[in-house]
Amino acid sequence: MPGAKSIAIIGAGPAGAIAVDAFMQEKAFDVIRVFDRQERAGGCWVSRDDEPPQQFDLDKLSERTADTPPEIPANLPCRIPATKQDRFTDSPVYPTLETNVDAAAMSFSQEPIPTVRSQWSIERHGQDTPFRHHSVIRQYIEDLFTRKQYQDLIQYNTTVERAIKDTNSQKWVLTLRRPDENGAQSDYWWNEEFDAVVVATGHYAVPFIPAIPGLKEFAARNPGSIEHTKHYRSPEKYRGKKVITVGASVSAADTAVSLIGSAQSPIHAVVRGRYNIYFGDEAFKHPEILRRAPITHITSNHSGDRTVHFEDGTCEKDVDHIIFGTGFTWSLPFLPQVLTRNNRVPDLYQHVFYRHDPTLIFVGAVGAGLTFKVFEWQAVAAARVLAGRAALPSVAEQKKWEDDRISHKGDGPAFTMLNPEFKAYFEGMRSLAGEPRDGTPGRRLPPFDQKWVDVFNAGHERRIKMWKRANMAAKI
C-alpha cells in the first residue's frame, strides 16, 4: 500500500517484536510506534505475581463477550479517574513454565534462542533438553528490540482502547490510555494518527470457561474455587484438596500432571477425547489421574454440598477446585469494525491482510505450530506490501482464498491451523513478500526447511516420552 508512512504496531510480544524489525528494515516508513499495555516486552511470556480473580463473570466468559471496550471520554486529551474494568492483563505464566516446543523450531530465522537450560528441564529431558524456561523466551523477545536500538519506539503501560479509520483524512485514529505515573489514581487519554495499523496483540489473554448448569452458584458459594489455567501458579495451593481439571490440551494436561503428589489422589480430569494433535493423551494415563466424562451439572448449597455430576451418571462430591484448561477467546475490543466469528478473525487474506482495508494488518492470527517463524514470514510480507514493494491480489481473489479455506478447514479454530500444510504457507508468504531487489533494503526470508517441522515434531515426542516414563515409574 504505497503512501503508508506512519505505522502503529499494537503489542510488544513475539509478533510485535518481529514486526518492528521487518518494518524497520524496509526503511520505507517515517514513523513506527509500538504500544503495549504491559510494563515490559514479552507479551504472554511476561511473568508477574498477579492475584487471580476471586469471581468471574462466567456468563460473559462463556459467551466470549467478557472483554468489552471501556467508555471513551468525550474530549481528548484528558485525565479522568483510573478505570476499574478488568482488561485481562494478568500474566498467564507460572514460575516453572517451560516451552513445550524445541527452541530451534521456535526461533526466528536470524536470531537463535540462547542455549540456556534449566535444571528442571534437564532432570526431565536430559542434558541436551531443547526446551527453555519462560524467562529465557521473554528476554529473547526483549533482546529483539534492544540489540538494534528499537526500544525507544515502544511506549509501555499504554492500552490502545480504540482504532478507527477517519473517512476524511483516511488516517487511523488511535485512542490511547495510560495510568498516570505520579501515583494518582487517574488515567491519561489521548489520540494519535497513523497511516496503517499492525495488530500483534496475541490471543491468550481472555480465558474461556464453558457454561455449565450450577457453575455460577458453585463459584458464588465457594470463592476462589473456579479457576482457569491462566491463573495457575503452583500445586501448593491445592495440597490435600479435591481437584477437577477440565480440558484435554496442553495447559490442562500440564496442570493435571503438576498436581500429582499435592492434590488429593486421584486428580479428576474431564476430557472429551479430543486431545491435542501434537501431544495426544499420554499425560492423562498416569495412575493418579482419573479420566472423567464431561460435566452435566454441578450442585451446591449452603450446607456444604459441592457435587459435580458427569455424563456417564457418576458424580464426585466434596470438590474443592475446578480448573478449566479450556482455551482463550479472541478479543479485539479496540476494533469495533472487526467482529470475530467462531473464535477467529474473519476477512483476513492469508491470515494477515484485512480484506476490507489493506492498511489493517494482523500478525499472529493463526493457531499453534512454528508460530514465531510464522509471525516472521507474515511480518515481512506485510512490511513489503505497506512499503509498496509487494502487491496483494484482487479483493475477489482474497475472498476466494478465504471461501476455499472454509470449505477445506471449516469456519472455526481449525481455519487458523497451518499444520500440516506448513511448507505451502511459508512459501506462499515468501512469494508474496518477494526478495529485496535493486538495492532496496528489507529482511530476507529463507526458503522453507523441512527440518523445522522435524525438530518441532521431535520435541513433542520428547515430551510424550517424559510422560510415559513418569507413568511407568508410578506403576512400579
Image: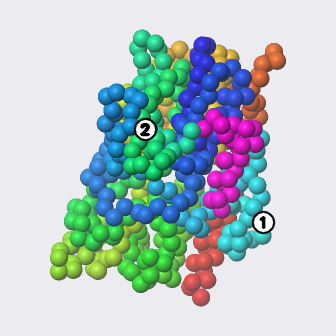
* Residue at which label 2 appears: 188
Q: Is residue 367 left or right of residue 389?
A: left
Q: Which mark is residue 320?
A: none
Amino acid at the residue labelled 2: Tyr
Extreme-top residue of the structure: 168
Q: Along the horizontal axis of the image, is 292 left or right of 114?
A: left
Instruction: Identify the residue at horizontal 71%, vertical 24% (top origin).
Output: 26
How far across and how far down the image is residue 347, in percent? 45, 27
Q: Nearer the viewer, residue 54 or 394?
A: 54
The quadrant where residue 436 appears: top right
Q: Is residue 150 magenta?
A: yes
Q: Judge from the rendering whether residue 238 lies leftward or rightward of residue 222; answer left or right.
A: right
Tell me the amino acid under the disc marked 1: Asp
Task: Residue 62: give x, y in percent of width and height.
Answer: 31, 52
Residue at the spot 59% in from the left edge and 88% down from the top edge: 476
Sequence-earlier tag: 1 or 2? 1
Q: Range of the magenta residues?
A: 133-154
User: Is 475 a magenta residue?
Assistant: no
Q: Is residue 32 visible?
A: yes
In the image as oriented, which residue stretches furthest toward the left? Answer: 302
Q: Residue at x 43, y 77 (%)?
A: 238
Viewer-nearest residue: 179 or 218: 179
Q: Circle 1 sits on which residue?
A: 128
Marks 1 and 2, Cα distance to the nearest angstrom?
49 Å
Q: Tell me if mark 2 has few (under 14), some (14-19) or many (20+) residues whose alpha carbon lies within 10 angstroms of its own.
A: some
